[in-house]
Amino acid sequence: MGVLLQMGLSAVVASLPATKGVAIGLAGIAASLEGAKRLSRRRRGRKTRSGEEGVILEKCSSVKWAGVTCEYREKGGSERTILKDAVGIAEPGRMMAIMGPSGSGKTTLLSALAGQMPKSKKVTLSGAIACEGGRVAFVPQEDVFYSQLTVEETLRMAASFKLAEGTTEEQRERRVQEVMKALSLTQCAGTLVGDSKTRGISGGEKKRLSIGLELLRQSEVPILCDEPTTGLDSFQAEKVMRVLRQLANSGRTVIITIHQPKSSIFGLFDDVVLISQGLTVFSGAIADAKTFFVERSGIPLPEQTNLSEFFLDVISIDFDNEAETRGNLMKLVRNFRDDAAQVARVVGKGPSGRRRAQACHKNFWHSVKLLYLRSFRQVARDRATNILRLTTNLNSAIVFGSIYWRMKRTQSTIQDRQGLLQVVAINTAMSSITKTLTAFSREKVVVDRERTKGDYQIGAYLVAKLAAELPVSAVFPIVFGALVYPMCGLNKEVAKFGKFLSLLTFESFTSSAIGLSVGSIVNSPEAANALGPAVMVLFIVFGGYYCREENVPIAFRWIPKVSLIRHAFEGLTKNEFSGLKFETKQPTDVATGEAALTRLGFGESSVSKSLVGLGRIMLFNYMFTYGMLKERKPEFQQPVASS
């Protein structure tokens, strides 16, 4: 066995050149192989922190890493080291804490181990990371779900995508129930997940649901959680940690980043990795960490002190006394590297033992069916949003109707009609895009997470989303138009009323499509809500009411052609003014609606042309959204050998 371990270490040393300090930790491991073997025997025989002997599942995987370095290239060309020569091992049946001051590199290390480091030309990730079996379950810090699905529906939907296609419905249901029971979610199975507008499950239950989604596919894979207690009260935080402790007791490998846990939570851990300034200060069993700091490094441990607070105080930099504390930190780092018995034993051959995410091979239309059900439930059950949209449209209709009440056919009402139709077009567009920007920005986080795991194709998601949302979204412009039309005394022909509603509905769909496009090119709801209205203001300016197309500078003449406000306003105006006759008192007065249209430059327009124009804009934005989402599928760094 010793020969095999020696060969494995030799392979790692050969694959990772000794530049940038990578070989420092590896050389220490190779030089004291027997010490590592003794540490391994001690750890296998040691009881877990809960006091129970860990039952190691036959298929459980360990996670091992050595020489893991992450560097960021700044604008000036200089490099900043975020993580340097990180080493460690996490074993089945044990729970490991990754701790350190803010900005120390905890999340960077966890992301590297999970294969979730976003790909960037400015970031270089190197070192050796090995996971037997090649897969891990990563639980991000932010818990994002479809808020209008229940806990059980969320897990069932995920099981339909994550479990093998040959899995029967009975097997999927059994797996869902197993996960809910293991994570203490059975009592809230029928409760909506909820969000800021809809009351739902607690923060702790959301965190456990996040863990459950990762465990559905493979229960034996290592679980990596980023700050699972952040934002939770002490009771919920401890409840989440005890669930993770139970998962470790069942034989899983559990790795968690956590910031200054209280004693009762820290007591649940078996092992700890301490990081400061991107450097690994210690990695190993908590009992050995205490020995390392107190006995080997001579640092006194005050009585009645929380060990986690003690560790963090020791490895933190005091910027009021930076030179001394930084010197003490570097001494600890050197002491740790000299003591190879505290370091992880072996990292397997090659830079990484994890498999890349596989492409989706699920049946397209089956995926559409499942995603349609999810999207329809989300939009139909979202009472808070639907009531707000309905109330807003009703209020706008009442305000506009009151201002433009029963307009007569005098000369002064010609401009009033045009003004009304312009604000109707603007209101419809803004109402629709605002909702889309807010909802899609949150939803995209879930979609990106799911499609990186090969759950479904992005085309299936868009088809299902549109099929589910468009019928519901049509209700609001129709209600708005049906109220404002008679209140303002617009053209009484039934056919024109129908065309009026059709134009508003089509414009609403087009505005939503633009919202999807905007959401597809930005990375946050804040950015989407800033960019969307700015784009819409541009379309309003060139919407046909404030400036004529022939007066627009040549460089901007393309904008009216792609302005949904322009197409909607033109269609609404043509629909309203065609066939109208106005009272005249002077020879220069406008006698007919056709004359008014000519003055606006809409003489050659038609409702059908406006609908076609809106349709083209809508189709283009749907295709643009598809292209952007497909092109911007999240990609992650794979560690490479240092150079």
Image (cartoon, helix red, strand yellow):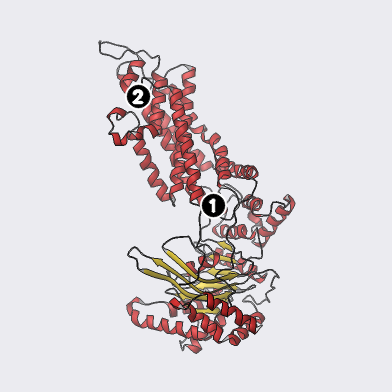
Where's residue 263, x and y in %? 53, 75
> In the displayed structure, does residue 438 sit left or right of residue 152?
left
Between 352 and 388, the one lying in front of the other is: 352
> For the C terminus, which image quadrant?
bottom left
> In the displayed structure, does residue 23 sit left or right of residue 460?
left
Q: Secondary structure at mark 2?
A: helix
Query: Which residue is identified by label 2?
Result: 418
Taking the image as drawn, is residue 56 in sight? yes
> For the N terminus, which image quadrant?
bottom right
Where's residue 401, x and y in %? 40, 26
Residue at (39% x, 27% y) in the render: 569
Query: Which residue is identified by label 1?
Result: 446
Between 306 and 118, the one lying in front of the other is: 118
Between 513 and 123, the one lying in front of the other is: 123
For residue 611, above or below residue 284: above
For residue 215, above or below residue 488: below
What residue type is disc 1 on?
Val
Residue 561, disc: none
Where's residue 602, x and y in %? 36, 22
Residue at (47% x, 23% y) in the render: 499
What residue type is disc 2 on?
Gln
For residue 614, above or below residue 494: below
